């Protein structure tokens, strides 16, 4: 099509099936205004889509514990969500700390700095997430992504496919 630019390639390991993959491609699309990208990409806008409530610790707990093999551990009064001995999410002072894919993490830091920031304690993959800035769909995608970072692909693949089917 004349006048349209090609989409940039996704970072290594990203695909349409990956949680946030389509969102990541839309965010990187050159020449689109925030209105064309949709409400998720407007910096500083805090709203829930479709009348859904803003996310909180209860939503994080419910989503994390609904995943196969996930359990909650309390450490110094804060909930940590693990599979076996590996942690994929924890809550601290109204924020979540999630283990996210590095490419997606850097993209989120760039397009939504009011919601996502680097976790200074950890060196890789961990991100602060302001729960109050997310709606339930966004939180679901992020928790699924964090969980899929620590479980084997043969365990995560059916869950991610089922989640993708339920959105369609």
Image: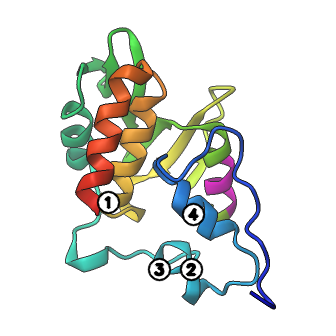
Residue 49 coordinates in the image, percent (x, y): 31, 76
Give the CA separation, mark 1 to mark 3.
Answer: 13 Å
Q: Is residue 115 visible?
A: no
Q: Sequence-wise, which precedes: disc 1 or disc 3?
A: 3
Give the quadrant of the C terminus.
bottom left
Residue on which the image places disc 2: 37
Where does label 4 land, which residue? 114
Look at the magenta stretch and give its main secondary structure.
helix
> Residue at 71% across / 40% down in the picture?
12
* Disc 2 to disc 1, C-alpha distance: 17 Å
Q: Quadrant of residue 88?
A: top left
Residue 19 position, x and y percent, is 45, 49
Give me the C-alpha separation between circle 3 and circle 2.
7 Å
Question: In the rendered structure, does residue 2 fall within the stretch colored magenta?
Answer: no
Q: Position of residue 152 (x, y in %)?
A: 42, 18
Mark 3, residues whose alpha carbon is within 10 Å: few (<14), some, or many (≥20)?
some
The residue that disc 1 covers is 137
Closer to the camera: disc 2 or disc 4?
Answer: 2
* Position of residue 36 in the picture relative to residue 45 (left or right): right
Q: Earlier in the sequence, mark 2 or mark 1?
A: 2
| Viewer-side label of 4, 1 | 1
Identify the disc placed on residue 39: 3
Question: Considering only vertical position in the picture, is 86 above or below 21?
Answer: above
| Rendering coords of residue 59 (x, y %) | 22, 49
């Amino acid at each position: 099509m004349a006048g349209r630019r090609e989409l940039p390639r996704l970072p290594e390991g990203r695909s349409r099936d990956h949680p946030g993959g389509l969102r990541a491609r839309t965010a990187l699309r050159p020449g689109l205004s925030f209105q064309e990208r949709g409400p998720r990409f407007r910096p500083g806008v805090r709203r829930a889509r479709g009348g859904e409530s803003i996310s909180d610790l209860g939503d994080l707990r419910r989503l994390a514990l609904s995943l196969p093999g996930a359990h909650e551990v309390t450490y110094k009064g804060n909930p940590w969500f693990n599979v076996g001995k590996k942690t994929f999410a924890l809550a601290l002072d109204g924020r979540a700390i999630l283990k996210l894919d590095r490419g997606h993490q850097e993209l989120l830091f760039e397009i939504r700095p009011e919601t996502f920031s680097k976790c200074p304690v950890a060196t890789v993959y961990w991100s602060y997430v302001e729960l109050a800035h997310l709606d339930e769909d966004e939180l679901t995608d992020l928790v699924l992504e964090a969980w899929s970072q620590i479980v084997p692909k043969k365990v995560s693949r059916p869950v991610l496919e089922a989640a993708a089917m339920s959105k369609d």
